[in-house]
Amino acid sequence: HRDWEAYDIGLHGTVYQVNKWDTEQFDFSKKLSDADYVGPTCQYCHMRGGHHNVQRASIVYTSMGMSMADRGAPLWKEKRDRWVSICDDCHSPRFARENLQAMDESVKDARLKYR
């Protein structure tokens, strides 16, 4: 599915594919930096805290791809802040915000080209 493909070709997925570390040995109660893992699995970020509601930390999807919802809406601020706190396990908040913004911009560009 598209989420796996996005992970698989991204930096975290590439590190996973190269190292093929044993995900059975992950202790999801620890931060990545404390547990000394090479990188996160999908579950580490999207199923944080052992829940199975991947939409809690998701972007907004529609049947035709990502919806360009109002990024100033309270729901988006809450989700963006949650993502920054997740990324903060290994990255600085500034790095996280800049990269999340860059991803937003790439989605906007893609939607203009492939509508």
Image: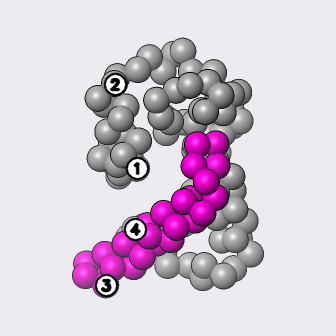
What is the magenta range? 88-115
From the image, tell me which residue sits under label 4: 65
Answer above or below: position of 54 versus 108: above
From the image, tell me which residue sits under label 3: 112
Question: Magenta span has 74?
Answer: no
Residue farthest to the left, as pictured: 113
Q: Residue at x 69, y 56 (%)?
A: 82
Q: Residue at x 64, y 49 (%)?
A: 88
From the image, tell me which residue sits under label 2: 19
Q: Nearer the viewer, mark 3 or mark 4?
A: 3
User: Which quadrant of the figure has residue 114?
Assistant: bottom left
Q: Are marks 2 and 1 in contact (CB under 8 Å)?
A: no
Give left or right: position of 34 versus 67.
right
**Spatial CA span between label 1 and label 3:** 21 Å
Q: Residue 3, labelled with which disc?
A: 1
Please tell me whether mark 4 sits on a helix, a strand or a loop. Answer: strand
**Spatial CA span between label 2 and label 3:** 36 Å
Q: Nearer the viewer, mark 4 or mark 2?
A: 2
The amino acid at mark 1 is Asp
Q: Are marks 3 and 4 in contact (CB under 8 Å)?
A: no
Please tell me whether mark 2 sits on a helix, a strand or a loop. Answer: helix
User: Which quadrant of the figure has residue 33?
Assistant: top right
For marks 4 and 2, the one nearer the N-term is: 2
